[in-house]
Amino acid sequence: MPDTIQPDPHGFKRRGVLFILSSPSGAGKSTIARKLLAADPSLSMSVSATTRPMRPGEVDGVDYHFVDLPTFKEMAANHEFLEWAHVFGHRYGTPHAPVDKMLSEGRDVLFDIDWQGAQQLHQIAGGDVARVFIFPPSLEELERRLRGRNTDSEEVIAARMDRAAAEIAHWDGYDYVLVNDDAQSCFEKVKTILGAERLKRSRQTGLIGFVRALTR
């Protein structure tokens, strides 16, 4: 039986959750994001646009929307992004229209973005945003994981480690913080957080009618 996140049994209408996962590269947020999407059919991934080159095995429109720099700049100038940032010499941004469409369909949206994007999204969407930051168990373990990928040069690994320190410095801008020393345990905690966020009173737009009927 699939490990799904159960919806509210009363079926109250509610506003969607913009659910952010952030962590230093290598701390496991992408693995947890994939598990969360597999566990919950009502959750959709926000696919970022990026100017970085496509890597082997990646699919345009699935992993990222791959665009050139002039196109990205034009999209930014036209206010087509909810948020965007420079990361490792490339640009990454969240297109506005697909997120609006998913929310209009009653779906929650998952974001795998850094602290800059999380900050921008929170400024725009406020109470609809839930932010989770995932720590590695240690910087030594983080470096071991990055090396274990066998995909990055020494220069890139050093840059990722430098950026990890900068990412961690912004942990207090998040609603929840977790340590990923066990992937399954961390996933279960993230799943619990999402379930609780969906049940917040401020999101239950159908509660007023229910309470009125209950107290007649």
Image (cartoon, rainbow, N blue to C red):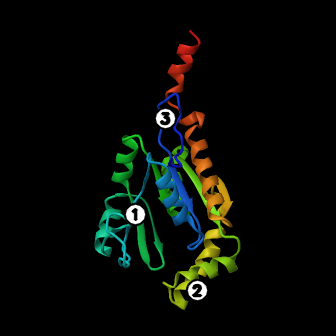
Cα distance between the residues tagged 1 and 2:
25 Å
* Disc nearer the start of the sequence (2/3): 3
* Disc nearer the start of the sequence (1/2): 1
Query: Label 3 is placed on what type of residue?
Result: Arg
- Does residue 120 lie above or below 40 as drawn? below
Cα distance between the residues tagged 2 and 3:
44 Å
Residue 121 falls left or right of residue 50: right
Query: Label 1 is placed on what type of residue?
Result: Ser
Write down the residue under mark 2. Answer: 158
x and y, in percent, of residue 152 in the image: 50, 85
Q: In which quarter of the image is residue 216?
A: top right
Query: Label 2 is placed on what type of residue?
Result: Ala
Mark 2 crowdedness (10 Å alpha carbons): few <14, some 14-19, many ≥20: some
x and y, in percent, of residue 60 in the image: 31, 68
Write down the residue under mark 1. Answer: 48
Write down the residue under mark 3. Answer: 14
Is residue 167 in sight in this rendering?
Answer: yes
Tag 2–tag 3 contact (CB < 8 Å): no
